RNA sequence: UGACCCAUGGUGUAACGGUAGCACAGCAGAUUUUGGUUCUGUUUGUUAAGGUUCGAAUCCUUAUGGGUCAACCA
């Protein structure tokens, strides 16, 4: 029996295995992870995977997670990004143990550098950027040291102090670790530890004019925070050798780095550099454009935190390159929204239906707010002699399995009556302008005694009661699955039809009370949320995702 | 002509020397006052060649393919 139970459990990913082994071996009493964004852009769905991974791991094994901003490059980093990142992590549903900054450690890092110099493991190099690159060799050719590598400890100490004191201009000197200039790992060829940048830092202001490089900040910050498992993406694999070397020489807490493959998604790009380009060159309206794969864009689009967490969990992690079908993400939003979205009827492209035998002025019909959740109750929908239906829900010459309206055919109007199309009215050009129908009074929804069975059910809106709204329909941002892999500029593959705006759609009056952050399902159309561009003069809805549509017009 | 990482259906991810499974997608059907939901069934896979073993997706070797590394970015 316990055997059966075990088989039901989801197996561990490779990081969970490492953590369990470490815990079992008594290596740590509890684990500590960190999420270390650089505040130079907005978080995207790839980061969400990392967030879910780091916070999820700590949560699962009773540890904690720090939010640490990797802010060692003052020229690209801004407070605006810090705030958006904090918002996004909170919105995703995670709480950090401590809010920390690599810049908190600048003084400590400086002392670490001094220690290396005193031990003859770092030196000040006066070479230019080009010279250093040239002397470093190539991946297939070893590098060679220059004369500065032979400077005395005393001289190095003095020079490094002078760098800090601002005696030199940007680029005049750097501090380098003395590791192995001939290593097959280029990152071990005396990597730069500190560079001079007379730049204003978003937190330390003008206190410093030298800033540590990633390799001399990240591992040390991990160590200072007693991070047990420092999880990063694959491109940092070669950095691990430097990471370990520095921790070893500095004799500080031995944090360990583990790498996993970053999450890629089809029909979008996932690098901050590319996303920044889309924003700066106005291909999108901003970082939170609903077409962007950013957390803020997806939130505005109507994605729920739950669906993103489910996605990250289900997609899993491993060490091989991957590109997940965006359809998986859409599956999880639909799954979540189906349970929670309030149903409303909205006609996007109307054609008028006149119910010729309807004699009442109007009546109010009841309809469930969400068939998946009876607790949401019912609402009233006004019905009258003239209604709108979707233009695509009528065909004069329908194909075989067309369940909608056609001359002489009957359909059910959702939560109302069955109607029959009697006459098609056209203008001079032959366009359908009106449909004249009759209704079956005994077919009223909920009290149908007509005995008539129809295959199709349409959504509709009473003409004189309709309210209008603007809707924004989004499609994939790029025309190809992996724009980053295509020839030439990735921007050449932008989908010109990724946004379709319909200025005026017709909705049932209940939609007038739509609230922000509440999901709606426009019946037979898709899931929508109110956009922040809405005002008292008009509502604007974003389509989060369409409904799954298994109808194939071409039958056969 | 280097080093390192990786290779399981269309996609993602399991199987830890012993029946290749799960999710999405696809296909077929049932139910349905949303062509939605729900339910049922189903197609498709271990990069290749050797070796070790009673037994290999798993271990070894080689090949092939993909990725990463030559920012004073992270």
Image (cartoon, grey):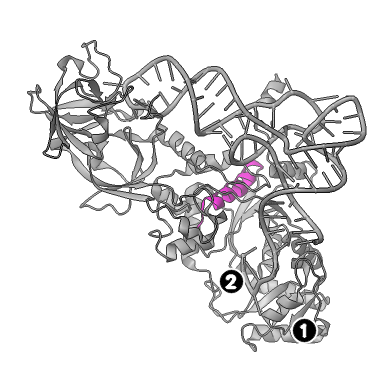
Work out whether residue B13 or residue A71 is closer to the camera in this orientation and state it. Answer: B13
Residue placed furthest toward the front: A429
| Residue at x 24% of width, y 29% of height | A395
Element carrying mark 1: helix
A58 inside magenta stretch: yes
A121 inside magenta stretch: no
Residue A418 is drawn in which quadrant? top left
Q: Chain of mark 2?
A: A
Q: How much space separates mark 2 and mark 1, taking CA atoms?
A: 24 Å
| Image quarter hosting the C terminus of chain A | top left
Tell me if mark 1 has few (under 14), some (14-19) or many (20+) residues whose alpha carbon lies within 10 angstroms of its own.
many
Q: Is A64 left, or right, of A332 in this rendering? A: right
Which span of residues is magenta-colored? A42-61
Q: Is residue A99 above or below residue A9?
A: below
Residue placed furthest toward the bottom: A167
Say whether disc 2 or disc 1 marks the residue closer to the N-terminus.
Answer: 2
Residue A328: % across, % down: 51, 39
Work out whether residue A338 or residue A182 is closer to the camera in this orientation and state it. Answer: A182
Report the number of numbered marks.
2
| Image quarter hosting the N terminus of chain A | top right
Residue B32: % across, % down: 35, 19
Tell me if mark 2 has few (under 14), some (14-19) or many (20+) residues whose alpha carbon lies within 10 angstroms of its own.
many
Look at mark 1 in the image and give the residue it sits on.
Answer: A156
Residue B35: % across, % down: 37, 27
Residue A225 shows in the view: no
Residue A311: % across, % down: 53, 41
Q: Is A344 left, or right, of A189 in this rendering? A: left
Look at mark 2 in the image and give the residue it sits on.
Answer: A73
């Amino acid at each position: 029996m316990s055997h059966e139970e075990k088989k039901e459990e989801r197996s561990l990913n490779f990081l969970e295995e490492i953590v369990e082994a470490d815990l079992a071996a008594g290596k740590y009493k509890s684990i500590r992870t960190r999420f270390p964004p650089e505040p130079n852009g907005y978080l995207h769905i790839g980061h969400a995977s990392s967030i879910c991974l780091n916070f999820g791991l700590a949560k699962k094994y009773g540890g904690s997670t720090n939010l640490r901003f990797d802010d060692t490059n003052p020229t690209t980093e801004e407070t605006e990004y810090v705030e958006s990142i904090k918002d996004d992590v909170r919105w995703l549903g995670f709480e950090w143990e401590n809010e920390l900054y690599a810049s908190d450690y600048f003084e400590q890092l400086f002392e670490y550098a001094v220690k290396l110099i005193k031990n003859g493991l770092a030196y000040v190099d006066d070479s230019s950027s080009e010279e250093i690159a040239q002397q470093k060799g190539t991946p297939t050719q070893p590098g060679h040291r220059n004369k500065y590598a032979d400077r005395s400890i005393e001289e190095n100490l003095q020079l490094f102090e002078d760098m800090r004191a601002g005696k030199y201009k940007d680029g005049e000197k750097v501090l380098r670790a003395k590791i192995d200039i001939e290593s097959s790992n280029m990152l071990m060829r005396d990597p730069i530890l500190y560079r001079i940048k007379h730049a204003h830092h978003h937190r330390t202001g003008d206190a410093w004019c030298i800033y540590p490089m990633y390799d001399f900040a990240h591992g040390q910050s991990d160590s200072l925070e007693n991070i047990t498992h420092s999880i990063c993406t694959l491109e940092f694999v070669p950095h691990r050798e430097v990471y370990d070397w520095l921790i070893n020489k500095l004799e500080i807490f031995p944090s360990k780095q583990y790498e996993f493959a970053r999450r890629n998604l089809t029909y979008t790009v996932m690098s901050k550099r590319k996303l920044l380009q889309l924003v700066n060159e106005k291909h999108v309206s901003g970082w939170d454009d609903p077409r962007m794969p950013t957390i803020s864009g997806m939130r505005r689009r109507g994605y729920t935190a739950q669906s993103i967490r489910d996605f990250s969990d289900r997609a899993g992690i491993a060490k091989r390159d991957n590109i997940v079908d965006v359809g998986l993400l859409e599956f999880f939003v639909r799954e979540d929204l189906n349970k929670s979205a309030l149903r409303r009827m909205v006609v996007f492209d109307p054609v008028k239906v006149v119910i010729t035998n309807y004699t009442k002025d109007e009546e109010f019909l009841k309809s469930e707010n969400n068939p998946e959740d009876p607790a949401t109750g019912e609402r009233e929908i006004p019905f009258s002699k003239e209604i709108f239906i979707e233009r695509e829900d009528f065909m004069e010459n329908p194909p075989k399995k067309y369940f909608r309206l056609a001359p002489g055919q009957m359909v059910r109007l959702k939560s109302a009556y069955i109607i029959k199309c009697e006459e098609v009215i056209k203008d001079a050009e032959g366009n359908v302008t009106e449909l004249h129908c009759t209704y079956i009074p005994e077919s009223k929804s909920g009290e149908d005694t007509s005995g008539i069975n129809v295959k199709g059910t349409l959504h509709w809106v009473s003409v004189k009661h309709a309210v209008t709204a603007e809707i924004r329909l989004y499609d994939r941002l790029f025309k190809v699955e992996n724009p980053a892999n295509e020839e030439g500029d990735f921007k050449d593959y932008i989908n010109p039809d990724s946004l379709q705006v319909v200025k005026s759609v017709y909705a049932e009056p209940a939609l007038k009370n739509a609230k922000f952050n509440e999901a709606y399902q426009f019946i037979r159309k898709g899931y929508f949320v109110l956009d922040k561009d809405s005002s008292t003069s008009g509502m604007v809805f974003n389509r989060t995702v369409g409904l799954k549509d298994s109808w194939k017009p071409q039958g056969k």
